[in-house]
Amino acid sequence: MLNRQRGGYGREARVLRLLIATGIILSAQQAPQDGLTVAQAVDAALRNYPSIQVSQEQINAAAAGIQLARTAYLPRVDALAQVNRATRNNVFGLLLPQGVIPAISGPVLGTNTFGTAWGSAIGALVTWEPFDFGLRQASVAAATAARIQSEATLKRTQFDVSVAAADAYVTLVAAQETVRAAQAGVDRAEVISRTINALVNAQLRPGADASRAAAELAAARTLVIQAQQAVEVARVNVSQFVGLPPAQISVAAPKLLQSPPERTVAPLDTAVNPIAVEQNAVIDQLKSQLKILERSYFPRFFAQASTYARGTGAEINGNNLGGLNGLAPTIQNSAVGFTVTFPVFDLPAIRARESGQSASIRAETARLRQIATDLTAQWNRAVATLGGARNVAANTPIEVAAARAATEQATARYQSGLGTIDEVAEAQRLLTQAEIDDALARLGIWRGLLGVATAAGDLQPFVAEASQ
């Protein structure tokens, strides 16, 4: 009974721990109550996006490759134990190296019999390479370069994910601002529609004006629906990076709704961009592999020591000892030696591999120059876009003020009987578009700053300023 109670308590404890752990995980995945900031969205993407985990595991694999390369400095020990039951017929002659016919030792008896005897063997061979003209060092350097490349790939992946998450975040804010401006247009259209309906009911305006007002109201609502659809799509794009359901995603970006202060753009240094850093790491790895090839055409020196023992159930005169004789090794030998190997005719193949590796290095070096050229062009475009966005943002308040005044004037003219419904509808559409342009103009500046930061390879200044 006591054991059953203890078992029940143990199960309850395990269930309780599971519930606590599940609660911790769920609480960690909940969106902030006040909405996500840009910094929080980027941090969540760096924690949750699967491609970053892929790059991290590639680093672990590269680190294991370094340890593998370093094991070449250690002595090699091969051990063997064998028991067999075989015939013992032997003949003069030789066989070229092959792996089909087993080797046999002992004198030639001049007989051919199917009698068998036990045989056994046990032994160990120790091999150590005291020096290698830098081959093992080059192998370790190549493995280290592979790890450095994996680390550079991780940083580039993190940068790409951060940029994509920030861009999705800004896109969501822009879509929400479009909904806000479009909803203001719906509100105005509803006011005008009610006013016109009252005038039509009082027979002060024709019924066609009411139909036109209803059509304009429906068009304004359609614009809101389309803008809301864009919001939902943008919210899904953000959820892809932050690891939250789209319904739980809300943004808190008051800074993005204001024009950022104008600052001088820092000069571009393409060498610090994660893409260029990764490409440099690729070139370094190829160069380290070339060094391995350059050190391949050298003699290999091996210090060796062997000890072994053999047993047989047959005598030299051909008699079979019978029983279990030969199952235990009874004759021992040992040897110490020094072996030198040299691949005499491998030079053409090695030279061909070196030529191929050198060509790969030149190709990747050219790709690095191409990356620098592309980054420079991307940076120049981003700077030009930023300048244009600032000019647009300076002009849109004028556009909004003029459109609002035109709407008020057109409405007043219509109510006094001096204007037409077409003038009012056109003025309202112009005001709605002006408000959308004004909201997106400020976000256009932030998008331009994001483009400059992307080309420069450093997103932190943008994230810090946008999250203040």
Image (cartoon, rainbow, N blue to C red):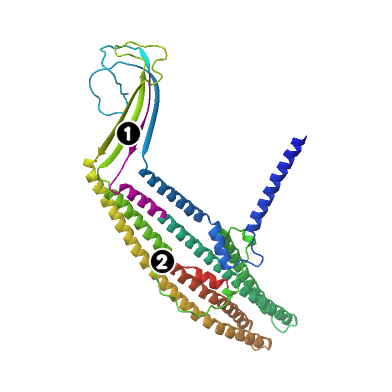
Q: Which mark is residue 272?
A: 2
Query: In front: 105, or 269?
Result: 105
Q: Secondary structure at mark 2?
A: helix
Q: Residues within 10 Å of mark 1 (few under 14, many from 20)?
A: some
Q: Is residue 123 magenta?
A: yes
Q: CA distance from mark 1 to mark 2?
A: 53 Å
Q: Amino acid at mark 2?
A: Val
Q: Residues within 10 Å of mark 2 (few under 14, many from 20)?
A: few
Q: Residue at x 71, y 48 (%)?
A: 16
Mark 1 / mark 2, whichever is N-terminal = 2
Residue 2: x and y, percent?
A: 77, 36
Q: Is residue 231 left or right of residue 390?
A: right
Q: Is residue 242 above or below residue 176?
A: above
Query: In front: 61, or 196?
Result: 61
Residue 5: x and y, percent?
A: 76, 38
Residue 105: x and y, percent?
A: 29, 21
Residue at numbered disc 1: 305
Q: Is residue 154 above or below residue 211?
A: above
Q: Where are the magenta residues, as a range?
A: 119-147
Query: In front: 141, or 255?
Result: 141
